[in-house]
Amino acid sequence: MNADDLILISVDDHICEPANMFDRHVPAAHRDKAPVVREDENGRQQWWYEGRPGRNLGLNAAAGKPREYFNTDAHRYDEMRRGCWDPDERVRDMSAGGVLAGLNFPNFTGFAGQVLNQGPDPDVNEVMIRAYNDWHVDEWCGSHPDRFIPCGILPLFDPERAAKEVRRLATKGCHAVTFSENPEALDMPSIHSGAWDPLFAACCDVGTVLCCHIGSSSKSSATTSDAPPSVPMSLSSSMAIYTLGDLIWNDIWWRFPTLRFALTEGDIGWIPYFLWRAEHVQERHSGWTQHAFPDGMGPTQVFLKHVLCCFISDPIGVELLHHFNVDNVCWECDFPHSDTNWPNSPEALAALLGHLPKADVDRITHGNAIRHYQFDPFKHRPKERCTAAALRAEAPDVDTTTRVGRKADERDIEHMRELARRGAAAAAGAAPPGTR
């Protein structure tokens, strides 16, 4: 396999939203309530909405930096690549890395938009969520329709309003929306409650995928408050395990046989074991659990039919691909987060997937994303200009080394410890204000 010939579409990238993103999209009557970026006494820049801090920048803007320069606490726009927040420069970075297109999750709002959902006035929250979506679809994605897959956020505080926004977004060509990996952790109805049926029905009607990104419950995978930072970093995928468990054992598949969820940034190598465990539970315990599946399915069939998954560079998952429906496996770059393998994604994937049939490689690297998210880059760009080599030829002057920022120090470790303490408090039901 030649890395130059790959066509790469990532189903998980992120935007470090620019500070002026709401200027053109919030009605005049609500502009005083719009989220803003403020600078603290230490020179760090942070989003705020209705007295709540947004998610910080830190590891969310690490692309191109040596690992000694990865920071976890909030920092500044001038300490990151311009491509983190500027769509034109993002496209140049993508081209330099041989990546054709990407689906971009939010950052400051939380991966499920939870910060904008938790303001005190639901009507104002909805205004800000719609403004975010209009900026994202019309400006970010609209600036380069061949390079970006739209992904909206929802007013999850009200499933009926969320359903309405799904339908509105579909008219704008957006068929991916974020959903929490565990909405109950955000003081919303659980996925087992039946309360989300209006949203699920809307997604089925317009063919929209519900994307559950790890961390979208505002919970971390911290074990103890004093665990070293490598513990939560190593266990980050564990949040997707809980989400998969809730999905497999749900009763929604009877009512919504075409509904699809995506597990995002959780890798895939662990999935075959948990499917085996679920099959074992059904075989041994269904006499008393009384769980039934529609159409003669079981846990594995539910996963294979309804759940999409993705990986960056997971060799174990690739070894176990025979346990998956390859039509539902995608690739992610995770730009500009700290796990990304940009700008060397084509080379990494060629080494990882080189033994697979070309048809499987094409599905994983771009075909599945095109189909599931109703995205057609070839309508705008000839296929021969979509390969890694062709894209890199368009951006020969891009410096892929990020030459701004500061070296990591004790501040970053302490910030991660603080996140662990907040996670432990949230798990105990005692999260301090503004942390959920």
Image (spheres, helix red, strand yellow):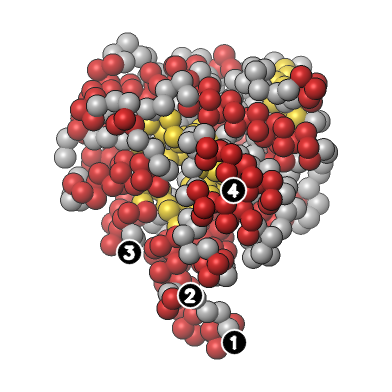
Label 1: how many Cα within 10 Å (few below 14, some 14–19, many 20+):
few
> Label 2, label 3: how many angstroms apart (C-alpha)?
21 Å
Numbered disc in front, either 2 or 3:
2
Q: Secondary structure at mark 2?
A: helix
Numbered disc in front, either 1 or 2:
2
Task: Quickly name the residue at label 2.
Answer: 294
> Label 3, label 4: how many angstroms apart (C-alpha)?
26 Å
- Seen from the viewer's position, the closer of residues 199 and 290 is 199
Mark nearer the N terminus (3 vs 4): 4
Q: Quadrant of the N terminus?
A: top left
Task: Quickly name the residue at label 4.
Answer: 179
User: What residue sits 58% from the left and 56% below the top?
Assistant: 200
> Label 3, label 1: how many angstroms apart (C-alpha)?
28 Å
Mark nearer the N terminus (4 vs 2): 4
Q: Which mark is residue 339?
A: none
The image shows residue 26, relative to residue 253, as above or below, that is: above
**The residue positioned farthest toward the bottom in the image shown:** 287
Callout 4 touching callout 2 (CB < 8 Å): no
Q: Secondary structure at mark 4?
A: loop
The image shows residue 296, relative to residue 6, as above or below, that is: below
